[in-house]
Image (tube, helix red, strand yellow):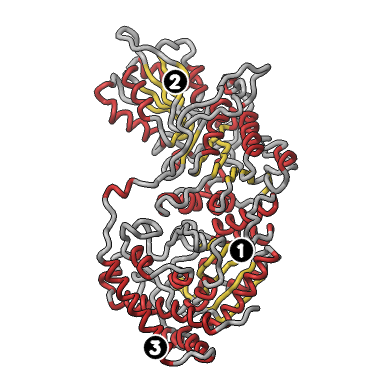
Amino acid sequence: MTKITKSVYEKAFATMATAKAMTELYEENFKIVSKYVHATSRGHEAIQIAVAMQLLPQDYAFPYYRDDAMMLGIGMQPYDLMLQLMAKKDDPFSGGRTYYCHPSLKDDDKPKIPHQSSATGMQAIPATGAAMGFWYREQTGIDDKSLSEKPLVVCSLGDASVTEGEVAEAFQMAALKQLPILYLIQDNGWDISANAAETRAQDAYQYSKGFHGLEAFTIDGANFEESYATVQKAIKIIREERRPVLLHAKVPLLNHHTSGVRMEWYRDDLEEAKTRDPYPVLINQLKAAGATDEEIDSIEAKAKKTVAKDYLKALDAEDPEPSDLFTNDFAPTPITEEKGERNPQRDEKVVMVDCALFAVEEIMREHPESLLYGQDVGGRLGGVFREAATLAQKFGDQRVFNTPIQEAFIVGSTVGMSAVGLKPIVEVQFADYIWPALNQLFTEVSRSCYLSNGKWPVSMVLRVPIGAYGSGGPYHSSSVESVLTNIRGIKIAYPSNGADLKGLLKAAYYDPNPVVILEHKGLYWSKVKGTDMARCNEPSEDYVLPFGKSNIVQEIWPSDTVETLTIITYGMGVHWALNASADMKESVEIIDLRTLAPLDEEGILTSVRKSKKCLVVTEEPTNNSFARSLAGMIQEKCFKYLDAPVMVIGSENMPAIPLNSILEQTMIPNVDKVRAKIEELMNY
C-alpha cells in the first residue's frame, strides 16, 4: 500500500475543514438555507474524503444525500453545492430540480455520477447495474483498452438503508457475477429517529457474510488514516481482481438528520458522538505528518473564507425561469419518421412473437453494446414464450443471460448499464410481476433525464408480456397500462401486430429514452380466433416506426346521411374492433394507437371530429383507467363536434381475472360485447 504523505493529509484536511465550515455556515443562516431541505456530512467526512481522493475520472460514483464531503473530495466547489442547496438555475447537477447533495455529474476530469433519487437504498441497483456494465464490456471485449487502470463503481449507502430488499438484490447480483463495485456503508447508528437496536438484526458487515463472494471490511470511519488505507486496499482488489467489496465504516452523526429533523428533538447520544469527531483526529494525524499549528490555522482560515464568499455569491445567483420547467423530460430521438419496407414480399407470414425475436437478433448482430437479460431468457429456454429462442446460442451467455427472480434489479440495473454506454433490452416475465420493479421504474429510470437536467437519460427497452390469454388466471393475465401511463418520463408502446412490434422495437432501441413495450400474449402466435391480422410479412431489417403515430386500420369518409363512429383502441382491442365492425366497415373508423405515450392526440381528435361519435376499447377494467382518461380528453376537446357521449368498454371492474374459462370470458371484453356497444352508441 502507498504511504499516506503529508500532502495527502493536507488535502484531506482542507476538504474536511471546508465541509465543516459549510455545515456551520448553514446553521448560522438556518432560516435562509432551510427553505429547501438538506443534510450534511458532519461526522462522516473522513471516510467520504478517503474514498473521493482515490477515485479516477473513469470511475462511477453513486453517492447518497449526506455525501457533500465526498463531492468536495472529487473536486466540486462549495459554490457548486450551494447552487443546489438553494435550487438555483445554474445548479450544475439538476438546474434547481432536486435536493442538496443529489448530484449528477458528467465532467471529463471527475468520476461520473448518474442521477439517483432520495429513496433510501435505491441507488444500490443502478450502481450495481453500472458495475455489471463494466463486467459485460470486459467479458465481450468492448472495454476501453486505453485505460491504464480499470474502472470501478462506488455505491454509498447509509447503514439503515441496507435493510431495504432492493439492496439485497444488488448484493446478490454483485456476488453472483463478481462485479467491480465498492459498497461504502456509512453506519452512524440512526435511521432518522429510530436507532440500530430497533431497526436491524445485524450491521452491514455482519449481513454481508451471507453473500458468498462479497468480501467485507469494518473500520472506524472517523479515522482518516484507517479509512484511507482500507479504501486503498479495497480499490486495489476491485481494480485488479474485478470482484465486489463491502466497506462498513462506523461514524458519528454530528449534525441533524436533515435540516427538517433536528437532532436535539430525539437524540440522547450527542455528547458521546462528539467524542468520535473525525476533525480533531485528522488534525493530530496531520501534525504527526509534520504540519505546524500555523499551517493548520491557515488551511482552516482559507476554507472559511472560501465558504463565506461562495455563500454570498450563491445567494445572488439566478433562480430558474418558469420556462425551465419544460425542458429535458426526454432526450431527442433520431426516429421521427417511418422508414424501411413495412410489407415486403415474403413466402409466408410471420407470427408476432417471431417479428420481435428477429428484431432483437438484428439489433444484437449490428450493435455489440446491446444485450438481453431477464428471467428464463437464457439458452436453456429462450423465454417462456420463446421470445428469445436461439439468441443465447447465437450471441453467447454474456450477452443473453438469465437473472434471478429480481424484477427490481432487472429494471433498475438498466440505469447503470445505460450510464456506461450500453443498451439493455430486459424482460419482466408477465405484466403481473412488474409491481416489484415499479419503485425502480418510477424513482430511478423515469426521472433520470429530467432530474439530471438532460445529462443522464436512461436508454433501455423493457419488454412486458401482457393481457389475458388461455385461462392464465389472476397472476398471468393482468393489464397494467393505466399504472404505467401515470409514470411520466417513459415511453410506452402497445402494438397489435407483428409489423408494428418490429418497427417499434427498432425505434425503441435507437431512442435514448426508457421504453416499455407491452406485448399481448394472445397475439404472439395468433391462436386466438380472429387475430390472424397480427401476422404479417416481416418488415425489412431497416424498418422503424416512430412513437406517437397512430394507425387508421379501418378508414371511413364523412357522411351526412350515415351514422358513423370512431373506435380508439390498441393491442387486442384492435382485433375485437375489426371483427365487431366487419359488417359496418363504411360506418366505423378504427384508430390503433400503437403507442400510449407519447399519444397521437391529433390523429385521435381528427377522426372523432369527422365521425361525431367515439368508443374507446380497452382490456383493462374501466374505472380510473387510461381509457377513461382518454375518453375525458376526447370529450373535452371534441365536445362541440359530438353527437353522443364518448363511451368506454373494457373488462369488468373486479380485482383480478379468475382462472376458470367461463369467468375469464365474463370478465374481459370480446367481439360480441364490443359489437353491442357499437350498436348502443350508433343508436344513441
**Residue 487: in sight, yes or no?**
no
Quadrant where the image shows the N terminus: bottom right
Q: Which of marks 1 and 2 is nearer the N terminus?
A: 1
Between 38 and 268, the one nearer to me in the picture: 38
Q: Which mark is residue 664?
A: none
Instruction: Give coordinates of residue 5: x percent, y percent.
Output: 56, 83
The residue pinned by badge 3 equals 297
Q: Distance between the residues labelled 3 and 2?
A: 76 Å
Please tell me the numbered disc located at residue 552.
2
Which quadrant holds residue 519? Answer: top right
**Label 3 crowd bin: few (<14), some (14–19), many (20+), radius 10 Å:** few
Find residue 181 and name its label: 1
Secondary structure beneath disc 2? strand
How many numbered badges does the structure rendering display? 3
- Looking at this view, name the residue that lies furthest to the top: 561
Q: Which of marks 3 and 1 is in front?
A: 3
User: What amino acid type is highlighted by mark number 3?
Assistant: Asp
Where does the image place residue 565, in percent across and percent down from the top left?
Answer: 37, 17
Which amino acid, mark 2? Ile
The reply to whether residue 86 is visible in this rendering is: yes
Dividing the picture into quadrants, the one containing residue 227 is: bottom right
